[in-house]
Amino acid sequence: MKFLLPSVCLSAALFAGIASVQAEVPRASAPAGAQVYFIEPADGAEVDQTFTVKFGLKGMGVAPAGVDVPDTGHHHLLIDVDQMPALDQPLPTSDAVRHFGKGQTETEVTLTPGKHTLQLVVGDKNHVPFDPPVVSEKITVTVK
């Protein structure tokens, strides 16, 4: 039992250290007036199960992840995300949070029939959203 307490304290200290490192992720400043938006599909559109999504960006440029050029970033597509991921950390990768780190400005998406929401977030070279975040309006599409 006397060995358990030091290991619990060590685990807590390591966890606190990891949490403090995560809290210190540097964020790039967003250019004034930067906007991300959907070119296609339009909000409220009815789409086939596989459809094209085109990303628009105003006031900044597109560059692949890892490329350190001021006022550039790359797209992340959020699908059916009810709660925005932490915007002060690298965005996670999942079916709901899709990364376009090669600098892509469009993609093909396949979704099940029904209503779905789409939203765009621009990340910096490290997939961290800008400060302030460059986030699109959330749109809804109905898949046939």
Image (tube, rainbow, N blue to C red):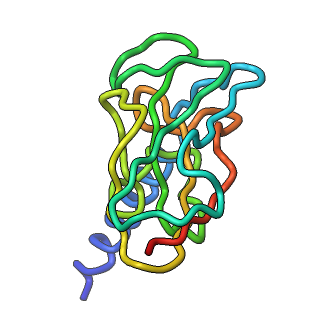
- Going 42% across and 14% down the picture, which residue do you hit? 68
Query: Residue 92, image x and y in percent?
Result: 39, 54
**Residue lying farthest to the top in this orientation:** 69
- Going 60% across and 33% down the picture, which residue do you hit? 130
Q: Nearer the viewer, residue 9 or 109?
A: 109
Above/below status of 108 relative to 44: above
Above/below status of 130 relative to 22: above
- Going 35% across and 67% down the picture, which residue do you hit? 49
All told, the count of numbered labels is: 0
Quadrant of the drawing holding the C terminus: bottom left
Query: Residue 134, image x and y in percent?
Result: 64, 37
**Residue lying farthest to the bottom in this orientation:** 1
Viewed as shown, does residue 17 lie left or right of 130? left
Quadrant of the drawing holding the N terminus: bottom left
Query: Residue 67, image x and y in percent?
Result: 36, 17
- Going 40% across and 38% down the picture, which residue do you hit? 106
Query: Residue 114, image x and y in percent?
Result: 48, 80
Above/below status of 91 relative to 143: above
Q: Nearer the viewer, residue 73 or 53?
A: 53
Viewed as shown, does residue 62 lie left or right of 131? left
Q: Nearer the viewer, residue 66 or 19?
A: 66
